[in-house]
Image (cartoon, rainbow, N blue to C red):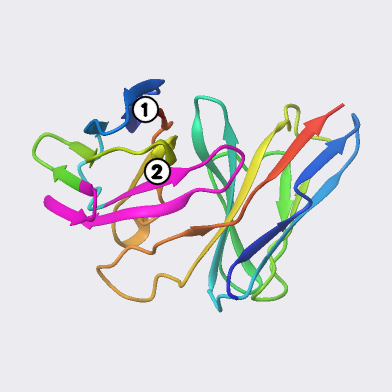
Amino acid sequence: QKEVEQDPGPLSVPEGAIVSLNCTYSNSAFQYFMWYRQYSRKGPELLMYTYSSGNKEDGRFTAQVDKSSKYISLFIRDSQPSDSATYLCAMSGSGSARQLTFGSGTQLTVLP
Amino acid sequence: DGGITQSPKYLFRKEGQNVTLSCEQNLNHDAMYWYRQDPGQGLRLIYYSQIVNDFQKGDIAEGYSVSREKKESFPLTVTSAQKNPTAFYLCASSRGQGRLGFTDTQYFGPGTRLTVL
């Protein structure tokens, strides 16, 4: 079993839809949670960063962390065709366990 | 204009050949990383370096080698011992792990796509 599981999709939604992307994990030591967006043939770019449980909002994006369920989510409101990309979750612990562990990515297409 | 550059963008390797991928950063970051990305498998850590002249193996270091002679540069050599080198290679850097209790946000370069002929 992988430490981080992410539904690979592909996921297609109409423009303006609310998108929900999710990851589950098994390592209870993970405390830091990130979402990266990767356009085709490009390097990932950091989208959201959260520490421990709770919500964080940035414009149309909301990141949620539920440590009790070992479950994280990224919500995209009013999705746009420019949001079409692969979304990668990543997480790490602290101390000697600070290296990032990535999910396999979810491919999202927003149709105009 | 700060950032991470990788070259070349595309690279072709013949069987039995060693190739070196370049990664340079001008962000004054202490830590640098190399990842490999294959379809459906996300990013896997090859090597990382937290300081000049020091580096550590990641999860899939076999068949790869690195050096860190300068803070700005972290080249990756894909040796002939790497049996399945065709992949997308990503370099990343971060400020370093000096602050207790904080993780270290990584910033990625544009990647190099390596294909074995």
Instruction: Look at the picture and state if A34 lies above or below A103.
Output: below
Give left or right: position of B3 versus A30: right
- x then y, percent, for residue A111: 39, 26
Indicate the quadrant where residue B116 lies: top right
- Sort mark 2 into few (<14), some (14-19) or many (20+) by Cα contacts within 10 Å: many
Give left or right: position of B21 versus B88: right
Indicate the quadrant where residue B71 lies: bottom right
Q: Mark number for residue B98? A: none
Residue B77 shows in this picture: yes
Marks counted in the figure total 2
Residue A25 shows in this picture: no
Three-letter amino acid code at the position of disc 1: Lys
Instruction: Look at the picture and state if B29 lies above or below A31.
Output: below
Say yes or no: labels 2 and 1 on the same chain: yes
On whether residue B65 falls in the magenta region, the answer is: no
Q: Distance from label 2 to label 1 (Cα)?
A: 10 Å
Give left or right: position of B98 versus A30: right
Q: Residue at x 87, y 36 (%)?
A: B13
- The answer to which of A46 and B81 lies nearer the viewer is A46
Find disc 1 in the rendering and name its residue.
A2
Look at the image and give the residue range highlighted in magenta: A33-62
Find disc 2 in the rendering and name its residue.
A101
Indicate the quadrant where residue B66 lies: bottom right
Extreme residue in the front direction? A112
The secondary element bearing badge 2 is classed as strand
Prevailing SS of the magenta stretch: strand
Instruction: Look at the picture and state if B14 lies above or below B29.
Output: above
Give left or right: position of B18 versus B75: right
| Callouts 2 and 1 close, C-beta under 8 Å | no
Earlier sequence position, callout 2 versus callout 1: 1
Q: Residue at x 50, y 48 (%)?
A: A44
